Image: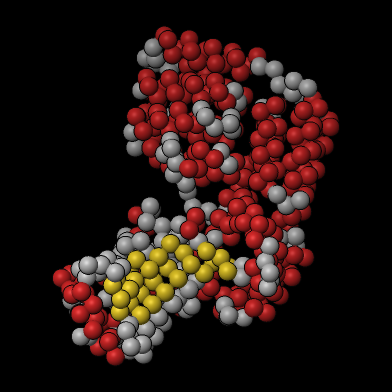
Amino acid sequence: MPESSLHGLLEQALAAFEQRDEEEALRSLLEAWRESRSELIVTLVNALSDRLIAGMPPLSCRPFAPEKQSHRPSDLPRMLAGFEETASAGLVDPLCRQMEAFLNWPADPRLTFALESMTRMNISANRKVLDQLAALFMYLRDPRSLESLRRLSKRRGMADRHVQQFAGIIDRIARQEVSPVDAEALALCAALEEARISRVKSEARSAPIREALLARVYSHPDDDDARLVLADHLLEQGDARGEFIMLQCASQPDKARIRELLGKYSEAWQVPLGPLVAPEDTRFERGFPVAVRMNVERRSELLYPLSPPPGPAWGTVREIDWKWSGPPDAAAWLAHPHVHALQHMRRTRAAIARRLGAHGLGVQRLELEGRLAVEAPEIFTALSELPRLTWVDIPNGDLRDVALCANSPIAWSALPCPCSANGP
């Protein structure tokens, strides 16, 4: 393989990193690894990957999950926890489907450690799993896997077919032709590592200022001056979030550029909200999340008690969509001081809503499920304790629900018609 190809990929990675497009830098580094199978490049891949996914929740490892179709480099390590859980649980067929799906993913050295771990699990004795392990090890052709493959091929009781299969893989990996990491490639790797370390140190130095400015935004979400001061600081640091804040605060924002920035950074900018949010549905205004949907796909996170507690970044959130899910004690979670800007709750279960009044939340608008007259006849009396509530929507309610509202203390709120229903 031509050395110039490896040099070109490393140059692309360095240029992308210097332009603060770290996802693209990672993509180029992975291509460089496929050219060289170099352990040095694996080290760079892991360091950059860890930066990109810091604080992000795991992703689904289901074969047809959107993340597996997009092949975004930073997604793969976030899938590995689910992959390893499936193996640890001994679920042969789901595991084989997940492994087969990885064959459609560009060869990635970050998968090697998970496969090596699997060879030490009982499930690796299953012939179907062995077939998929063989296919993936051959696909990756990672020299770092040779020791695990040699150990696996000597396992007692292994069928001759698998012994021969793994012997062939070992031979193929040992004999493969790759681009050598010569002096020029080593210099490019060193420059990239130096740039990464320099950025880490720069971010650490500026962190106290950045955190102080963020705290001001979270505490005073209506103060545009606080956002613009933060934007200036971020722009000085080369952080795309600064440009994003400026664009969304502009009188005539560049919508195309806003979409581009959200496409690249939206998920990373939501990390401070924690794992309970579905990142694909968050709406940003003036540079920060204002409307979120709770992540009902991760149901284990929505069991009592709701955790983790909301962090300071929830200070800009005005609207929460529960998608008819969430534990009854979510009301106590919402009463945390960090959720001080909340005004609108959509698709809220009666089990949550009936407890809101006890916490005196500042919710102004509430959307509830229908059949309240049957399943929660006391709910409007409880809601009358909310000092700012002015509207209740019951999109799938009926006339009995409206009557229940009209005959409750809530009917005497500021608006002449505080309750609406769209049902029959």
Residue 364 falls left or right of residue 195: left
Give the percent coordinates (x, y) of residue 24: 68, 43
Q: Is residue 109 above or below residue 310?
A: above
What's the residue at 40%, 80% (across, down)?
364
Give the percent coordinates (x, y) of residue 306: 36, 64
Q: Which is nearer the eye, 206 or 256?
A: 256
Q: Residue 309's image quarter?
A: bottom left
Give the percent coordinates (x, y) of residue 15: 78, 44
What's the residue at 33%, 88% (across, down)?
416
Q: Is residue 168 above or below residue 370?
A: above
Q: Residue 188's image quarter?
A: top right
Residue 188 falls left or right of residue 317: right
Q: Is residue 44 above or below residue 150?
A: below
Q: Which is nearer the eye, 235 or 178?
A: 235
Residue extending farthest to the front is 424
Q: Is residue 166 visible?
A: yes
Q: Residue 362's image quarter?
A: bottom left
Q: Where is the C terminus found, in terms of image quarters?
A: bottom left
What's the residue at 39%, 12% (across, down)?
159
Q: Which is nearer the eye, 171 or 140?
A: 140
Q: Is residue 315 above or below residue 58?
A: below
What's the residue at 57%, 26% (across, down)?
140
